[in-house]
Image (tube, grey):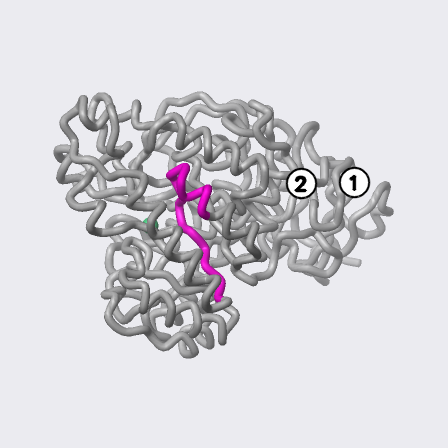
Amino acid sequence: MAMRVLLKNGRVLDPRNGRDGHLDVLVAGGVVARVGRDLPAGDARVVEVPAGVIVCPGLIDMHVHLREPGQEHKETIATGCAAAVAGGFTAVACMPNTDPVNDQAAITQLIIARAEEANLARVYPIGAVSAGSKGDRLSEFGDLRRAGCVAVSDDGRPVATALLMRRALEYASLFGMPVIDHCEDPSLKGEGVAHEGFQAALLGLRGIPGEAESIMVERDVTLAAMTGGRVHVAHMSARDSLRAVRDGKQRGVHVTCEVTPHHFTLTDEALAGYDTNVKMNPPLRERLDREAMLEGLADGSVDAIATDHAPHHHDEKHVEFDRAPFGIVGLETAVSLVFDQLVHRAVITPARMVELMSVNPAAILGVAGGSLTEGVPADISLLAPDVEVTIDPARFRSRSRNTPFGGRVLRGAVAATIVGGRLVYLNDAVAGTAALAAAFTAPEEPR
Ligand SMILES: [Zn+2]
């Protein structure tokens, strides 16, 4: 007999079904069996959802780097999935810049097999646009799709030429996949390590102008219009990129975009001190760019929040600024940053947060999730908006600790994560969650 748990009286936020109110959710046989007011318990175990806790469709991070195969000293699929569920994510989509690159079915299958072994978050592989992500010839999208890829990208690098991007958009359309582009003109980026502006000049760092990004966003919008394909702009950071996305959307072009928590939280002023944990690509930009990202998150021009979780070993980051690799970990800080920086400052509503972190990523990738519709797999995030957390990298489940947010006190926490009706993460620092553990793990009573 499959386990039945009735989550009583949580604040259910399910924008796809127009739900925002105190409701019960019945989880049975791994699916959302019923959602409603005062549901009868029947033979289900009853858990009172702690006061103030939000019950929403599982969060989906559509941009992570799990590093396996090839760089297991930074992260493995198992440690990355543990970090994901601790961060409230029930699913992640992983970029193909592993070693070897995920440009063929055998690699995709390996990633899926490792994710099944880990048995925590769902993992959706993203295949490479080009063989080896070298930018020369397209990989076999059909093979990648059949093996389980949900999108294609050469992330870490841009799709180098307009011709390759055109072909990728045309080819990916045949399989219903978006092309996710790391938009960055290599010639404008040059040897840059930080946003080109006052701070970089002050600190003597080589700059990367915002236009290095926006010029390629404009190219991609133009090519998406030309081909009818779907382009998704990864980790958008520059205000002119947002303008290009908005223009495209107004013209009916199939363009979507994501913003990371670090780009909506920090600016290049964080560079003072040369902390390599603020070195990321695209770089932290200036105040007007951050403000534009906040505006886009609020008004719907930005479709998704994604972390660009990029684990690096301590030794790799513990070098001078110019030599350090780009990127920070993000899975275990995202929810707290979104609540603290966006929800509690009234930039977005909690319902919009669910759209940005669950509904829209599911729709863009064409994967399950994004709603608590009766009958769907019970992938559910429980979030505690008012619980304060102090970010402690030493306690991360991720194998890497490269975050600029260590020591920050933020309001907003993950309470629990449920995947396929199984409780895969519980934060015992949130009062009242012990009952969840009991309900989801106690042995079945004979019937
Ligand atoms: Zn990237």
Instruction: Evaluate whether residue 223 shows in this view.
Output: yes
Whether the magenta-drawn stretch holds residue 317 is answered as: no
Answer yes or no: disc 2 within 8 Å of ligand 1.
Answer: no
Residue 434, how many percent across, how many down?
62, 35
Q: Residue at x 38, y 68 (%)?
A: 166
Residue 23 disc label: 1
Q: Secondary structure at mark 2?
A: strand
Q: Secondary structure at mark 1?
A: strand
Q: What amino acid type is highlighted by mark number 2?
A: Val
Q: Is residue 256 above or below residue 243?
A: below
Q: Residue at x 50, y 58 (%)?
A: 122
Residue in front for this viewpoint, 80 or 63: 63
Residue 55 disc label: 2
Residue 194 disc label: none
Q: Is residue 297 above or below residue 96?
A: above
**Circle 2/circle 1 CB separation < 8 Å:** yes
Q: What amino acid type is highlighted by mark number 1?
A: Leu
- Which quadrant of the view contains residue 141? bottom left
Label 2: how many residues lie within 10 Å, few (<14), some (14-19) or many (20+)? many
Label 1: how many residues lie within 10 Å, few (<14), some (14-19) or many (20+)? many
Q: Earlier in the sequence, mark 2 or mark 1?
A: 1
Q: Residue at x 72, y 63 (%)?
A: 1
